[in-house]
Amino acid sequence: MTSKWNFFNKFILLFFLFLIPIVYLYSNSHRNTMALLKEQITNYNLNQLSFLVNEIDTNAGKLATFPIMLNQDPDIREFQSYFLSSKLLDLDQIDMIQRVETKLVLQSTSSVWPNELSLYSTSLDLLISTNTMNNKQAFLKEVMTHGQGWNFIDKGKKRAVFSYTLFDPFHKAGGTEETDFILEMQFPASNIEHLLNRYKVEDGNQDPFFYSPSSGSDSILYNGSSDRGKVRALIADISIPQNREKGELTHTLDDKKYKVFYVKSKQLGWYLVDYIPEAEVLGPIIKNRDIFYSSTGLLMLLVIVAITFIYRQVKLPIQQLVYAVNRIKNGDFSYRISIRPKSEFRFLLERYNYMAMQIEQLIENVYKEKIHSREAVLKQLQSQINPHFLYNCLAYINSMAKLQDHDAVIAMSYHLSKYYRKTTRVENQTIPLQEELDLVHSYLEIYKLRMNRLEYRIDIPDAMRRLSIPRLILQPVVENAIIHGIEQKKNSSMLRIRGEIEGGICLIHVEEDGFGLTDDEMERLAEKLRAPLNEEMGCGLWNVHQRLIIKYGESSGLSFSRSELGGLHVVIRWDEPGES
C-alpha cells in the first residue's frame, strides 16, 4: 500500500512549513509595531493635552490669586472696615471707593486672559466691579448659590464663565450676615475655547473639548470646528475614571473605533478630552498588513494553481501507475491506464499498458499449464492413496487365507471388488459425498469382518450428502482412526462420523475412543501435514490435507483435537461446497 506521506504531500507540507515562519514573524512584527505605535500615539496625545492643561491651569491659577492678593491690599482691608449708619458717603469714603475700583481694574488688566473682578462689602452693602453692567442682586444670588472656590456659570446667550469666589472670613460661606465681604474673579470660557482652537489649528487631526463629568452634558466647551453631535454621543457613552488624572479609552461609535485621551485640570477639575479615529492613525500600518496578507493569499492561490498543475501532470499519472502496479500485484492483469497526459508520462503509461498486456498473455498461458499440472498432481495424489489402501486389504486377505477363514476372504473380496469399481473411475475427480460414504461403509464392513468389536455410527445431513467432494477424502481419515486408534486399544470399539454446515463452511467430524494424542503430538502431526511429504510419514492424511488445500484454498484441510470419546477428534473442513 502506498504511503500517504509521499513526495507530493511532503512537497506541499514543506512549502507550508516555509510559509508559516514568515507569516508568524511578520504577524509578530506587526503586532509589536502596532503596540509601539499605539503607545507612542497615546504618549504624544497625552503630552499635548497635558501641555494645554498646564497652560489652562497656569492662567487659571494666576487669576485665582487675584482675590487673595486683593484681600491683603491695605485699601481693600480699610474698605472692609467701613460701616455706615447713614446712606450718605463723605469725601474720604468716596475717594477710598475710587482707589479700590482703580486697583480692581489694574489687577484685571494685568492678565493675558480677559477677566472681571468684583468686590462686595456686606457692611456697606456695596458692589464694586470692573464690569459696569454687573448687578448687585444678581451677583449675590450667583455667589450664594455656587459658594466659595471655582465654579462654572452658564449665563446663556453663548456666554459662559469660570468664577473663583473668596469669602472673608475664609472659613465661612453662605448668608451675607456671616460674611464681611466677597471677592470674585470671572473669566469667560471663550479663553479656553481660543486655546482649543489654537490646538486644533496646530494639529488638524485633533478635535479637543473641555468637559466636566460632574456637571452633565451641558458643561462642554467645544473648539470652533468641533462636531458637537459626535462629541455629545461620545460623552454619553464613555465613563472617565474619577480617580485618574489622565489616560486613554477605546470607544466604538457608529461602527468606528476611536481612541479617547483625557487629562484632568487640577485647578478647574474639568477634563481636557481629545479623540481620534483609530483607523486614521493606524491606517498605513493596517494597509501594509492587508497588502502583505493579500500578497500571501495571492501567493497561496498561485501555489494552489501550481500544485493543481503538478497534481494533474505528475501526481495523477504516478498515482495511476502505482494503482495499476498494485492491481498487477493483486493478480489483476487486465487493468489498463486510461489517462493520457500531454507530457513525458504519456510514453511511460503507454509502455506500462503494453507490458501489462504481454504479462496478461503470459499469465494466461502459464495458468493454463498450471491447471493441467494441477490436475495431474491431483490424479497422482489419488493414485498414491489407492495402493496404500489396497496394500492393507491384501494383507488382511492374506491373513484370513492363512487362517482358512473362507467367508472372510469371500466377503473381503466382494467389498474390495465393489470398492475398486468406484475408485478406478478416475475420469471424474469429484464425487457426491454419498458415494464417498458408500465407500466408507464398505471399508468399515471389511474391518468389521476382522474385528468383531468394531462399532460405528454415521450421522451426515441429507443436504451434505448431495455435495461434491474430491475422491477418497473421508476414507483415509477413517482408515487412520481404525489403524492408529481402535486397533491399538483392546477395549476400544466406537467410531463416530458426523457432518454439519456452518455459514457455508462444511465440517465432517471423525472421532474414536482409542488412546488419542497429547497436545504436543497433535501439534507435531499438524506441522507434518504442512511440510513436504517424506519417507518417515504415511501419505494418507498428508494427501487428504494437501488435496483439500489445492481444491479449496489455504483455510481448508485437517485439524486435530481430543474427542469426547477419549481418542482423537479429526475435523475435515472445506470453505465452500464442491460442484454438484
Image: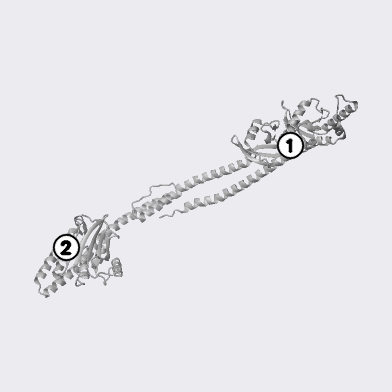
The vertical placement of 509 against 88, above or below, is below
Numbered tag placed on residue 537 in the rendering: none
Tell me the kind of residue under disc 2: Leu
In front here: 94 or 86?
86
Quarter of image, res 493: bottom left
In the picture provided, is 564 more to the left or to the right than 120?
left
- List x then y, in percent, for residue 99: 87, 30
Marked residue nearer the N-terminal end (1 or 2): 1
- List x then y, in percent, for residue 105: 84, 30
Residue on which disc 2 sits:
439
Answer whether residue 178 is visible to the viewer in this image.
Answer: yes
Tell me the kind of residue under disc 1: Leu
In the picture provided, is 157 more to the left or to the right than 364?
right
Extreme residue toward the top, this view: 88
Numbered tag placed on residue 268 in the rendering: 1
In front here: 146 or 494?
146
Q: Answer whether labels 1 and 2 touch (C-beta < 8 Å).
A: no
Identify the residue at image location x=36%, y=50%.
Answer: 336
Q: Quadrant of the N terminus?
A: bottom left
How many C-alpha atoms fall within 10 Å of the one at disc 2: few (<14), some, or many (≥20)? many
- What SS does tag 1 mark? loop
The vertical placement of 577 against 179, above or below, is below
Q: Quadrant of the C terminus?
A: bottom left
Extreme residue toward the bottom, this view: 402
Identify the image's colour scheme: rainbow, by chain, secondary structure or one colour: one colour
